[in-house]
Amino acid sequence: MEAARIYVTVRRARQEDLPEILRIERESFNSPWVADMFASELSPETGLFLALEMEGVLAGYACGRAVRDEGHILKLAVAPELQRRGLGRELIDTLLLEFRRRGVEAAWLEVRRGNGPGRAFYRAFGFAEAGVRRRYYSDNDEDAVVMVKTI
């Protein structure tokens, strides 16, 4: 028996994606971004805002910025009901490829110290822990682990 193929597309996020992105955001994070924060990322001059569709349904998103030779991953989320299907891998691969295309030499991100699965996910892509930002998250004063990957 042949496994069913899943069709995935990664593209630039659009204004009409925001309601579904906000739903995924609220279900994924303790301190979710609000609509205005995402709307400012829609401008291609300021960053890289990707939407991932699976079988035509918005299933995840990633936000990043490339400034000179550094990239910063701001957000990455997959709808909770669609996790563990390789969709996050598609997003991070596309984001890193676009960083490389823009001349980025190192990509940075912050992840909650208590988010073991998130830290393991990024380590699987070659990110290494580079430091800690004490009391970084305002909702509970949790530390952020700073991670970096040379591209």
Image (spheres, rainbow, N blue to C red):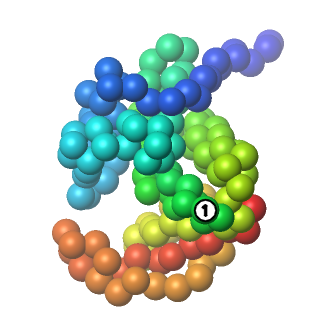
Amino acid type shown at disc 1? Arg
Residue at x-position 24% and y-position 79%:
141
Residue 7 % position (x, y): 64, 18
Horizontally, is 74 left or right of 72 in the view? left
Image spot of residue 16 (x, y percent): 32, 21
Residue position for label 1 = 68
x, y percent for residue 54: 54, 22
- What kind of element bears circle 1? loop
Q: Residue at x 39, y 26 (%)?
A: 14
Above or below 92: residue 24: above
Q: Please provide percent x and percent y for residue 103.
A: 71, 55
Q: Name the residue: 61% across, 46% down.
A: 95
Pick the front one: 35 or 77: 35
If the image is split into quadrants, where does the N terminus sit?
top right
**In the depicted structure, whether residue 14 falls above or below residue 73:** above
Front residue (pair 49, 138): 49
Q: Residues within 10 Å of mark 1 (few under 14, many from 20)?
A: few
